[in-house]
Amino acid sequence: MNSINQRSVDHVRLGMLTLTIGAHADWIPVHQIVRVEGAGNYSRIYTQSGQVYLVAVTLQKVGERLVEFWRAHKSHLVNPDYIRLIRKSPQGRFAHLTTGEAVPVARRVTRYPD
């Protein structure tokens, strides 16, 4: 079962993303973050273990801290390590992840992760 915790993103240090709420801090290894989904002034961080963190930070700000992530869509950052394939369908283009999820890929995206 996924739990959602509201946090704020502080910074990335030594491959860790630090999420804080008050005096409590969680450190998430960046390599365990599968994707980040933006929702207005908030972002949801999805991890390999199924944990979901709701952070009070825009997707743009999270993207500035996770520079190795691929901007697939205006509302999605994806860790390239979890992309299985990118496929075009009648509904549009989607990045299919190793977790079984499919993330939309914007029509204007012409650069794909290596």
Image (spheres, rainbow, N blue to C red):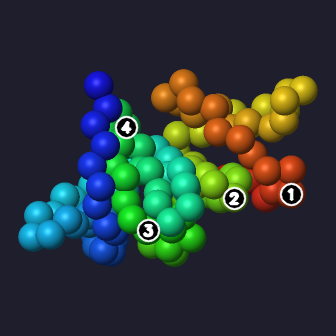
The residue carrying mark 1 is: 108
Q: Are discs 3 and 4 less than 8 Å apart at CB?
A: no
Residue reaching furthest front? 40
Q: Say which mark, if any, is on residue 52.
A: none
Q: Are discs 2 and 4 less than 8 Å apart at CB?
A: no
Residue 50 in percent (x, y) is at 35, 33
Q: What residue is drawn where x is 30% and y is 74%?
A: 10
The residue carrying mark 4 is: 48
- The residue under label 3 is which amino acid type? Val
In the image, residue 99 sits, relative to residue 28, either above or below, namely above
Nearest the viewer among 70 and 21 is 21
Q: What residue is drawn where x is 34% and y is 49%?
A: 53
Helix, strand or loop under label 2: loop
Residue 73 in percent (x, y) is at 70, 53
Can residue 101 be seen here? Answer: yes
- The residue under label 1 is which amino acid type? Arg
Q: What residue is drawn where x is 86% and y is 57%?
A: 108
Q: Are discs 1 and 2 less than 8 Å apart at CB?
A: no
